[in-house]
Structure formats: C-alpha cells, structure tokens
Image (cartoon, grey):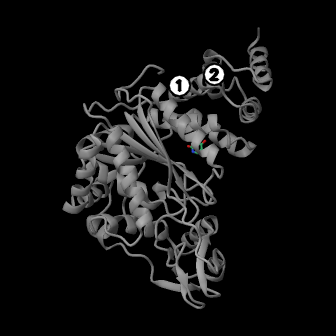
Amino acid sequence: MTEEGWIRRALAAKRDGAPLAAETWTRLVAGYLNGAVDEAQMAALAMACTIRGMAPEEIAALTAAMVHSGDVLDFPTGRTVVDKHSSGGVGDAVSLVVVPLVAACGVPVAKLSGRALGHTGGTLDKLEAIPGLRTDLEPAVFRAQVERVGCAIAAQGPRLVPADKQLYALRDRTGSVPSPGLIAASIVSKKIAGGAGAIVYDVKLGGAAFLRDANDALGLAQMLVDLSGRFGRRASALVTAMDEPLATNVGTAVEAIEARDFLREGGSTPNQRFAQLVRAVALEMLQVGGVDPGVAAERFDRALASGAAYEMFVALVVAQGGDRRAFEGLAALPAGAPALAERDGFVAAIDGVAIGEAARDLVAASGSRAGIRIIGTVGTAVRRGEPLAEIRGAGDATAIARAFAIAAEPPEPVRLIQATVRDAEPRAASKGASE
Ligand code: URA
C-alpha cells in the first residue's frame, strides 16, 4: 500500500471509532514531523479523536511518540526530580512559590513552564518580569542548575517535544483543543521529556478555567495520573476551583512580587485560599518526591519559617540572571483608579476571565509592573462606593467593577480543593516501561 493509502486508511478507521495501534501512532507522528502526513490529515485525525475519544493505549502511544520527537532530559541526581503543572488559571502564582519551597525542603524541582494562554497567566511571563531573569535555558544549563541550586524554571525549548508544539498549534486553529486524550498526551509528553521523575498536576475547574464541568476535570485528573504511571512516574492530581482570581494581585510582576513577599514573610498572608493551595500542592510534591507525609509537613513549615524557602527563590532568580537587589526592590506601579461597589451587599462572584483579560491589557499598555489588586474577595461585605479592586498603573476601572457581582446575601463558599487523585499503587519513581 502507498504511504498516502495507508494514512487514509488510518484516518478512516479513527473516523469510524476504531482505536489505532501503537505502531500506527508512532508512524503518524513521525510522518507529521517529516511532512508525509500533512496539516489537513493531522487536523482530521485530531478532530476524529476529539469526537470519538481515545482508548488509554492510544493516548499512551501518542504520548510516547511525542516524547521521542525531540530531546529527552535526564537527571542523574540520585534523587527524584519533581515537576508541577497547572492547567491554567487567573492569579495562579503558585508555581513561583512552590518550586523554591519544595527545593528548600530537599526535593529538587525541574519545572518546564508555559506562557499566558487566553485570559490565563503564564509562569514564564511572571518570572521574566523580574529584571534580568531569563527562562530560555539550554537543556544542559537547566539540568546543571537543578543539580547545583536545587530548582529551575525554564521554557520548553524548540528541541523538546516538537511534535506537541506543531500539533498544539494545529489543534488551536482547528477546534480540537478540548479533547481529554489529546490534552493529556500534550501535557504528559512535556513532563516526561523534561526529565521529571514525579509530577503533581493542578487541574483547574470553574468559570475562569478551560474546564467547566466537574466530571471532565476529574476525568482529566485521573487520566494524567494513569498516563504518568504508564511511564513509571509517580503522580498526583488536584482538581481545584478556578472562578475568582487565586492571588490577590493579577498581572505579571505583581504576581512575582506577591510570591516573593509570601516567602519573605514566612507564608503569612491574608489570602488564605492562596496559602491553602500552596500548602496542598507543595505537600503533594514532597510526597511524590518520596518524603513521608508527616515529615513533609514539618519540612514545609520549617522551610517557610526559617527563610530557607525565600533564600531558595533568590538563588533561583540569581542563577537565571536576575539581580538580587532589583528583585528585592521590585514594586508594582502606584495605585490608580479604584473599582467601586455600586451597591451595598456581599461580593457573590468575581468574573475571573474579565479580570484576567483586563490585567493582560493593563500589562500590554503600561508594562509588567501594572495589574489589578483585588480588595473585595468573594464573600466580602461591601458598602456602596467602597473599593472592590484597584488598578496598578493607568486604566479605566469601570469594566473591572462590572466583574464583581454584588448580592444581598453572602454566597455559599466554594471548596478550593475539590478532589485529589493519587496513584493506586505508588511505584518506584524511575523512568519507565512505556518509553
Ligand atoms: N496545556 C497543554 O500543554 N496542552 C493542551 O493540550 C492543553 C493545555
């Protein structure tokens, strides 16, 4: 059979709901990279997967094929190197805190991060708002920094999972992003290629997340954990609420400043939801990294209280080209116009998408030190004319005020951590079988 005939037959099988064999996935991914499978054919395949779904074996085969489309990093530290991935939220500065915090607890962290997508913020954009700091680390530099400092946060380079880069862009253009199988393969392939021995996923659920259905979020969390297990990685996934912004400040530098101050103040913050998620994610990272749960909590508290976690953040910043004094002195732009409550009542909801988009526009107009500071979190009692939020930099606060719904009664609290999915049977955090 000709190559063209073989590709057509595979596409027709997937269109009709038949699972494709592992060798077929390997061949399709290789063909996509070398041009034998063109964009139209790959788009048809991605759409067929989105509509028909994918069997666990297919997701594993696609993941393996994508992992081997580029470089695969390895960490010969003798200790499990941990990574953490959030599916994207607003004011989600958790990575900036937990990466140095977990490293200060003795578990090395090698984090590959992404940029802002839509209304959600990107860890790389927040970090790069620190003067001088670079995230385009060569694989050898990334690896050496993890071994020397204990942690690093870098961008996915052009040689790491190039098949995902190409396929993700195609899915984005052709309406096939919301396929749980394709999302899982895309995320997990990057974590495996990045060299993580154990991974914690934070699957966001709610009005300001990409997933808005609880069953979809739980299904993806389970899929991420199972798929990581097939590659011999220990993994946990939290499903966490993402409706209102998580951090008090939304933007780029303003979130890095909040993360810095959280660590500098030994974890003391009025924002209890942020503190709760930091603790949950960090303890989960320590556990998948091989630390006993009782010991993990003790190390977490000590690393924060002693200042070791803060010093680790400074060490990461300096190792990646940032200047300690500039980092320590970094400040948000002065407060501009406040967004005011139009009536008495309780903050019933905050439209996280609107806040994320407004913060992105403020940063584009006034630079990285611009953003939004939330004052009236969900549940806060407010009186007409009181501030709900303030702009850092110059901008119109009326649209921001409209993102706050005020009701006569206080809302039912939404649980921050909705579910935790762990490996059924913890396995050795070694590199594994399916590769
Ligand atoms: N994030 C990813 O890395 N890939 C997806 O497909 C969706 C979110």
Name the residue nearer the viewer: 33 or 28.
Answer: 28
Name the residue nearer the viewer: 58 or 45.
Answer: 58
Name the residue nearer the viewer: 403 or 142.
Answer: 403
Question: In the displayed structure, does residue 66 sit left or right of residue 288?
Answer: right
Residue annotated with mark 2: 25
Question: In the displayed structure, does residue 369 sit left or right of residue 213?
Answer: left
Say above or below: 334 vs 222: below
Q: Dots 1 and 2: beta carbons under 8 Å?
A: yes
Q: Residues within 10 Å of mark 1 (few under 14, many from 20)?
A: many
The amino acid on which the numbered mark 2 sits, given as a three-letter code, is Trp
Residue annotated with mark 1: 64
**Residue at left 48%, top 20%?**
434
Question: In the displayed structure, does residue 82 sit left or right of residue 24?
Answer: left
Residue 308 x/y as whole percent: 21, 57
Q: In which quadrant is the N terminus drawn? A: top right
- Where disc 1 sits, the SS reads helix
Q: Quick check: can you spot residue 368?
A: no
Residue 99 x/y as whole percent: 35, 51
**Residue at left 26%, top 55%?**
312
Name the residue nearer the viewer: 280 or 361.
Answer: 280
**Residue at left 29%, top 43%?**
293
The amino acid on which the numbered mark 1 sits, given as a three-letter code, is Ala
